[in-house]
Amino acid sequence: MTRLLGEWRTLWRIAAPLLVAQLCYTGMGAVDTLVASRAGLYDLSGVAVGTGIWMPISLFLTGLCYAVSPITARAYGAGDAGRVSHVLAQSLWLGAALGAIAGIALRLFGGPMLSWFGIDADTFAVGDAYLNAIAWGLPGFCLFQALRSYQIGLGTTRAEMVIALAMVVLNVPLSAALVFGWGALPAMGAVGCGVATSLLFWAGAAAMGVTVLSRGRPSRAQWRFDGPLIKSLLTLGTPIGIAIFAEASVFAVIALLLAPLGAVAIAGHTIALNLSSIIFMFPLAIAMATTARVGFLRGRGQWDLVRFSGLAAIALGCAFALTTCVLTLLFRADIVAWYGAPTAVQELAVSLLLLAAIYQIPDAVQVVAAGVLRGWEDSKGPLVVALVCYWMIGLPGGMWLGLGWFGTEGLGASGFWIFLIVGLTLASAGMGWRMRHHYRRAPLENQTTAPT
């Protein structure tokens, strides 16, 4: 038990700052919505549809950059300082290139993608301008994600927490000043939210860069573009980006499929999903910390601790999930009441939160297990599991049970949530099988002294 608690403390030292940072990033989106809602109806709707385009792109780019973490962690664990610095330099090349490509693509294709939604002209104008503003910040966003992933790989996450807190605090006055005008600044409407976000991306990247480079700079030789290493980062990161996108997009598709059932079904689903998304930050932070920890131990060649750390991380995720499950069951009616929704919406949301409470346990297992696998530099396995369990089982099953397809009577939103539980449970089993595969192939030699 002492060994388990010690491993939990090690993981939590890395994960706790990441949790705060993740909540801050969520808060930045909430600030944009809040400020835009006070600017006007079309400003709010324009930011909403623009976010619908931008958010999946950001998730994919984050996944691409996340490959830096396990590679850095393994080099750091092996004590190869030269390799660590080289990965840092190449990750900045990767971030800059991804940001430039994504920014150009968003400026060229953001408007055409918005037109697919068939929205009114005023909403389109705001959404298109919002995306153009975001596009200018994408190089900063990708550089920030690359540096952030590098820091996670080293297990040093407090700097990111401080920077994230500063970003969300500054986002409030900066967005308000640009949206409504202040002094010499003209009122830009909701577009100001996009400008503020882009400026904060660049500021965050600069602050993270100063923090990282103050601890040691790569040599001139390490800065030279390394095609094979960049290819390795992309080979590892692309499946991560696709897997994150695939999991997140399932929920967006469910909302669209619920549209014919009316506003009550959509609103109840949205409230339940909003709470679940906040709770998900706990196992997600543990998963990111686990990737760094497992990668570090692999670099040290401490294979018994590699195995133990992965299992301990899943146990920690389950402990948090059981706690949030109980709290959700006890207080779900009170939580839903905070939203001030109509009675019918509240009743549906309360019933969905019963399923959401169950959903939290397999969700924690699968996301932490995916973090373990990424520490093994395995991203293709989690991608296959995600695609099969979410898109080939969870979503079709939800359509069958929720919408009454194939001759059955539909259960509405509840049917989708039941099959989310099924999909996540199967994903947990799939990730566990993949972990077992790696554990059986690991070298047999053991070193039992835990690293500091």
Image (tube, rainbow, N blue to C red):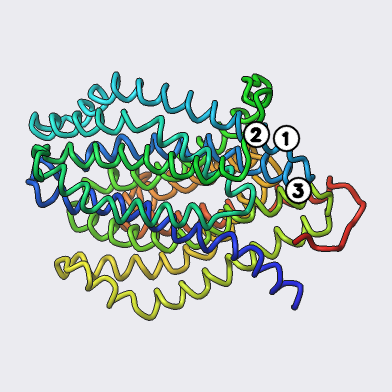
| Residue 426 seen in the current view | no
Q: Looking at numbered disc 1 in the image, what kind of residue is underneath it?
A: Arg
Q: Give the quarter of the figure containing the C terminus.
A: bottom right
Numbered circle sitting on residue 77: 3
Locate residue 122, reporting x and y percent: 8, 32
The type of residue carrying mark 2 is Val
Position of the N terminus by quadrant? bottom right
Q: Name the residue under label 2.
A: 87
Q: Camera-side residue: 42 or 24? A: 24
Q: For mark 2, does the 10 Å Cα neighbourhood hold few (<14), some (14 to 19), or many (20 or more) residues?
A: many
Q: Position of residue 210 (x, y in %)?
A: 50, 42
Q: What residue type is labelled 3?
A: Gly
Mark 1, residues whose alpha carbon is within 10 Å: few (<14), some, or many (≥20)? some
Residue assigned mark 1 = 83
Q: How crowded is mark 3: few (under 14 residues within 10 Å), some or many (20 or more)?
A: many
As drawn, 428 above or below 46: below
Mark 2 residue element: helix
Percent from the top left, x then y, of residue 403?
Answer: 31, 49
